[in-house]
Amino acid sequence: MDNTSKAKAFIELLNQKKFSQATSYFSDAVKSQLPEQKLAEVWNSLPSQVGKFKGLGKSKSVTKGQYEVIVILGEFEKTNLDLEITFNKKGKIDGFFMRPSTNSKSKSSENYKAPDYANPKLFTEKEVIVGSGEWKLPGTLTVPKEKRKHPAVIVVHGSGPNDRDGTHVNPANKPYKDLALGLASKGVAVLRYKKRTKEHSRKLAAFKKLTVKEEVIDDVFFAVDLLRKDQQIDANKIYVLGHSLGGYLIPRINKRSNQISGFISLAGATKHLEDAYLEQNEYFVNLDGKVSEAEQKGLDEIKSIVKKIKALKKEDLDSSKVYIGAYPAYWLDLQKYNPTHDAKSIIKPFLILQGERDYQVTMEDFSNWKKALKGKDNVKFKSYPKLNHIFMAGEGTPSPSEYSRVGHVSEQVITDIADWTHKVKK
């Protein structure tokens, strides 16, 4: 059976709620992340978000190193999802993601309802292009209507191939769009754009030398150039807001930041990405209070991969092996990067925000920033007891299932960013 047929069979098992059989398609690593109970929880939460499953549409295959990625259109009552299933060379599923489909019959934006704090009478939105040539990206610039030059914020994405809105597990959750509409309602322009790994995924899948420079950083400066040329924007008040991976990379961005006035970190990571990946998986398997044999085997496999990443050398630069979705060049580039150490050289205003219920980037990371930047007058810190990784409120033990619930970025976060942006001195 080829991988496309396996992918379709796997989805059919989910539809029939045969979750135990479905997990037999998983590699040990994925079994630790998505054991039967968690897989059932994720799939059974879909009807409330996108309606009942109706069937499968067209599929495509993309080869990425030793992996084959099968993307199948999943047709649901309310909208469609791209079901992305990654197979390793042994024919086992090494990754399973569901994303709003670009071919959805009802655009995912139709599921979105603006937060109460967004006032459409106070701002306008226009389509823009960030960059040029082969890597140009579609974006949206949200600008206050008041006739004056406005401070502006550039939203820099977290990990993965994100759209401009940061559309999350539930297509109705769009944290970057919340930020744009909320901040523009308070006099701050916001530029958000589709991430390069989302817009140009096929070309980048075969690019062995990809690093965070090409994935994230280069486009930040294309965005800065765009804003500096816009007559509605105050060129002396352009700020970079990095979420998760974007926050982690702020010290790198700072090194090229002559035209950036300050930085805002939302859940900025501080640890090596492979270590954070392992910690998240350890958190997942311990959620139910016990670790099964399959889960432990999966964790051991992840630990082995992390060890291999840390052992990479320059000689591995041209290797076709893929580790946690990236070629060696990506990991080698970050091997000696220490964001908290490098952040000490940031002299521009720096606002660091953290949700205390975030299990992906944790309060330990927040503490790492505070320790490294203690006593610096240009840095301000704030954490929020009820907020998670996307700065939406929740209760109880944090888990992936809460991302399925519809929510909005906390209004307090919007207010804090807007107030800081208006008051900060360059």
Image (cartoon, rainbow, N blue to C red):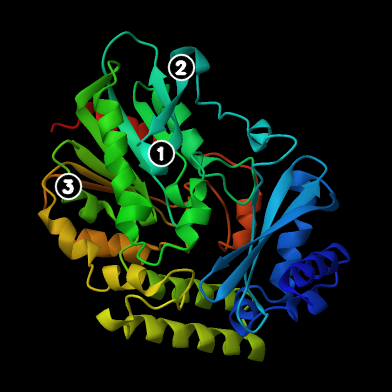
Q: Residues within 10 Å of mark 2 (few under 14, many from 20)?
A: some
The residue sitting at the right extreme is 16
Q: Does 115 sit left or right of 126 as displayed?
A: right
Q: Is residue 353 visible?
A: no
Q: Identify the mark at residue 30; answer none if there is no mark.
A: none
Q: Secondary structure at mark 2?
A: strand
Residues 103 and 141: in front is 103
Q: Secondary structure at mark 3?
A: loop
Q: Are marks 1 and 2 in contact (CB under 8 Å)?
A: no
Nearer mark to the viewer, of 1 and 3: 1
Going by the numbered disc 1, the residue's amino acid type is Lys
User: Residue, x 45% and y 75% (percent of image)?
Assistant: 279
User: Residue, x 56% and y 30% (percent of image)?
Assistant: 115
Q: CA distance from mark 1 to mark 3?
A: 20 Å
Q: Residues within 10 Å of mark 3 (few under 14, many from 20)?
A: few
- What is the quadrant of the N terminus in the image? bottom right
Examine the rendered structure and indicate whether residue 245 appears above or below residue 196. Answer: below
User: Residue, x 50% and y 24% (percent of image)?
Assistant: 118
Q: Identify the mark at residue 124; answer none if there is no mark.
A: 2
Going by the numbered disc 3, the residue's amino acid type is Arg
Examine the rendered structure and indicate whether residue 61 appears above or below residue 88. Answer: above
Q: CA distance from mark 1 to mark 2?
A: 23 Å
Nearer mark to the viewer, of 1 and 2: 1
Residue hosting label 1: 136
Q: Identify the mark at residue 256; answer none if there is no mark.
A: 3
Q: Does 254 sit left or right of 4 as displayed?
A: left
Lower position in the chain sequence, tag 1 or tag 2: 2
Q: Position of residue 190 (x, y in %)?
A: 38, 30
Nearer mark to the viewer, of 3 and 2: 3
- What is the quadrant of the C terminus in the image? top left
Q: Position of residue 301 (x, y in %)?
A: 52, 87
